[in-house]
Image (cartoon, grey):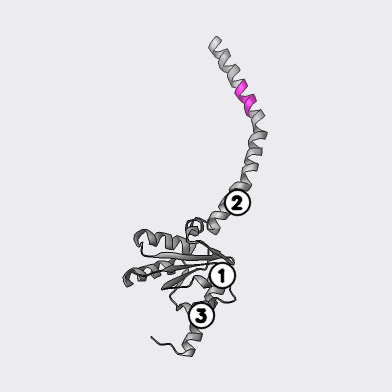
Amino acid sequence: MALNLESKKAIVSEVNQVAGQSLSLIAAEYSGITVERITQFRKSAREAEVDVRVVRNTLARRALEGTQFACIQEKLVGPLLLAFSKKHPGAAARLIKEFVKENEQLKVKALALENQLLPPQALDTLANLPTAEEGIALLMSVMKAPMGKLVRTIAEPHARLVRTLAAIRDKMQSAA
């Protein structure tokens, strides 16, 4: 399908805008996957707030210039889909990791996160990043732990006294 210059400019602008608002990018080769499976993947991506694009590599390279994903430009070779994570850096990685379990034809070619090009093996690491809510919960539990320990330490002498008195009472009752 031939695109005119205005269509190409619109695609580049649109992808550039999505890249500017995204936290991470995954480029994956989709050869051999049926249209039905790709449609299911796109539906899952929309639900996970991941923007999936299939764009000509030359247009994608232009669109990624000047963004934090410019480092991935040399990896854009072959039929690729680009998955942009908008809300959480690991969202696209989790989505692709799940999809690959049933569709081994999808091959991750590169990942980009914060101006860094990551190898395809980093998919699991990126997918296992905690979400914002999980991160906050983890931080709160770490912050709460010293307070709980302090409260238990302060309460221990009183608890020990109560246990000692109870033991003395039990001993006197059994002796009588």
Measure the C-alpha gap from mark 2 to mark 3. 37 Å
Marks 3 and 2: in contact by CB < 8 Å? no
Measuring 63% from the left and 47% from the top, which residue is drawn there? 143
Rendered position, 16 above or below 29:
below
Measure the C-alpha gap from mark 3 to mark 1. 19 Å
Secondary element type, mark 3: helix
Q: Identify residue for label 1.
A: 71
Relative to 64, 159 lies left or right: right
Of pointers 3 and 1, the one earlier in the residue sequence:
3
Rendered position, 59 above or below 129:
below
Measuring 51% from the left and 81% from the top, which residue is drawn there? 12
**Label 3 vs label 1, nearer the camera:** 1
Q: Identify residue for label 2.
A: 139
Can you give x and y, in whole percent of width and height, for residue 8 in the image? Answer: 48, 85
Q: Is residue 176 visible?
A: no
Can you give x and y, in whole percent of width and height, for residue 146 in the image? Answer: 65, 42
Q: Identify residue for label 3.
A: 14
Q: Amino acid type of disc 1?
A: Cys
